[in-house]
Amino acid sequence: MLRIHRRLSAALLIAIPGLVWAQAQMLAPRYAHTATLLADGRILIYGGLGPGDGFVGGTEIFNPATNQCSPGPPEHRCRAFHTATALPDGTVLIAGGFIRPYSTSRTAELFDGRRFVFLEAKMSAPRELHAATLLADGRVLISGGFVGGVRSLAGCDLFDPTTHSFRPTGDMRNSRFGHAACLLDDGRVLVSGGMQYPGEGTLAEAELYDPLSGRFATAGRMLADRSRHTATLLDDGRVLITGGYSATAGRQFAGTELFDPATGTFTGGPDMAEPRMDHTATLLPDGRVLISGGFNGQGEPHTVSSCEVLDPEDACFRPGPHLPTAVHEHKATLLPSGALLVCGGLKIAGGSKHVTSDAVTIIP
C-alpha cells in the first residue's frame, strides 16, 4: 500500500491571458482516482493507482481556501477506476472499482463528512470503469462497467440513499465500459459510446434511460464510435461529446458532436486542436466548456498538456493554458468559486510513464 506524506510546496500563481492557475501538491501521486466536491466546498480525493501501478492507500482533503491537501479519514478499500457521487444529503457514495488483490468489486461505502461507512448492500455485479449518474430524485444510476479480464456489462443498478440499498434496473441494449452518462434537463440519462469485451470494439450506439419506467431506449448512433470520451450538458440542453478512442479508426479523435434531446439527433461539432482521450470536459459557470489534458496515441504516443475552451456562442475552441505537467486519467472538479481543480494523473512520453501529484487550480 502506497502512502506518501510530505510538506506541501508553496502555491505558485501564474497569469495567462484570460486564465490564471495556482499550483499545489497532493500528498500522494495518483491516477484513476476520484475528486469530489463536498458540501462545505472542500474536495475529497479517494483511491487511484500510483507509481508502478500500485494501489494508493489513504484519502486526502483539498481545501481551496488554503490551496493545500491534508490527510483524510481512512477508507475501507483501496480502489481505482471506481465512481464517487456527491448525494443531496451531503454524503458521498463510493462504488465498485479495481481492488486488491487485482479483482473487480461490487462493494460500496459512504463518506459522511467525518468517516467512511462500509455498506452491507452490494451492487448486482462487480464493476469498474462504469458510470454513476445522480438522478433528479436523488437516486444514483450505476451503468455498465467491466469485470476485469472477463466481460463488459449491460446490467445496471439503482442506489437509493434513503435505504442505502442497490437494486437492479433495466439492462442497457449494449454491454459497455468506458462510456459516458449524462443527466438531461428532462431527467433522462444519455449513455453514449464505450467499449465491449471480449472483442475490444468501440460503440457508436447511444441509449436513453428513463427513471420513470426504469428502461433504456435507443437514442440512435453517434457520428463515430468512441470510448473514454466526455459528455457535457450545455446550458441550452444539448450534450457536447468530445474526443475519445475509436477501435474502428484505430486512433483518438479531435472531433466533437452534439446531441439534441429535442430532436434525438447527433450533429457534428467543432474540432479540438488536438486528438485526446481520458481527458476532462467541465461546464464553467459562464457556459463555456474547459477541456484539459488527455492522451494522444498518434505518432509517438504521448500525454497532452494543453487545455482548450469552447464558447458555445461562436461554436469554436480557443487555446487555453498548458498544464504544468501533461496528464491523462486525471480529475477536474469545479469549485464553488467557479475555479477548476485539476489533480493527479498519468503522463506518458518517450516510452516512459510518470504519475503526478500536481493539484492545479485554473481560474477562468
Image (cartoon, helix red, strand yellow):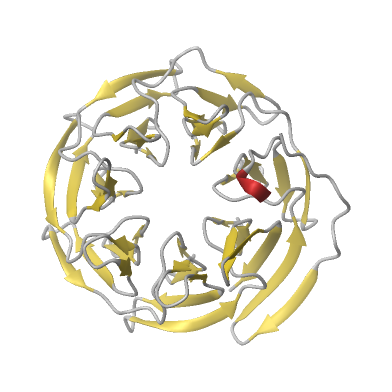
Is 144 in front, or is 313? 144
Residue occupying image coordinates x 35% and y 37%: 145
Depth check, front residue: 152 or 254: 152
- Up/down of 200 relative to 235, above or below: above
Residue 324 locus on image (x, y percent): 67, 73
Q: Is residue 337 visible?
A: no
Q: Write the residue at 29% across / 50% down.
A: 194
Q: Residue furthest top?
A: 120
Residue 283: percent from left, percent from top: 44, 63
Q: Nearer the viewer, residue 209 or 75?
A: 75
Residue name at image x 74 percent, y 52 percent:
26
Q: Residue furthest bottom?
A: 17
Apparent side of residue 215 relative to residue 37 in the rendered image (left or right): left
Quadrant including the C terminus: bottom right
Q: Position of residue 8 (x, y in %)?
A: 85, 56
**Quadrant containing the N terminus in the rendered view:** top right
Q: Is residue 107 above or below residue 269?
A: above
User: In the figure, residue 318 lies in which quadrant?
Assistant: bottom left
Farthest residue, direction right: 7
The reply, left or right, for residue 35 in relation to residue 269 is right
User: Which residue is located at x 81 percent, y 66 percent?
Assistant: 11
For the question of whether residue 56 can be seen, the reply is: yes
Quadrant housing residue 326: bottom right
Left or right, 124 with respect to 333, comes to left
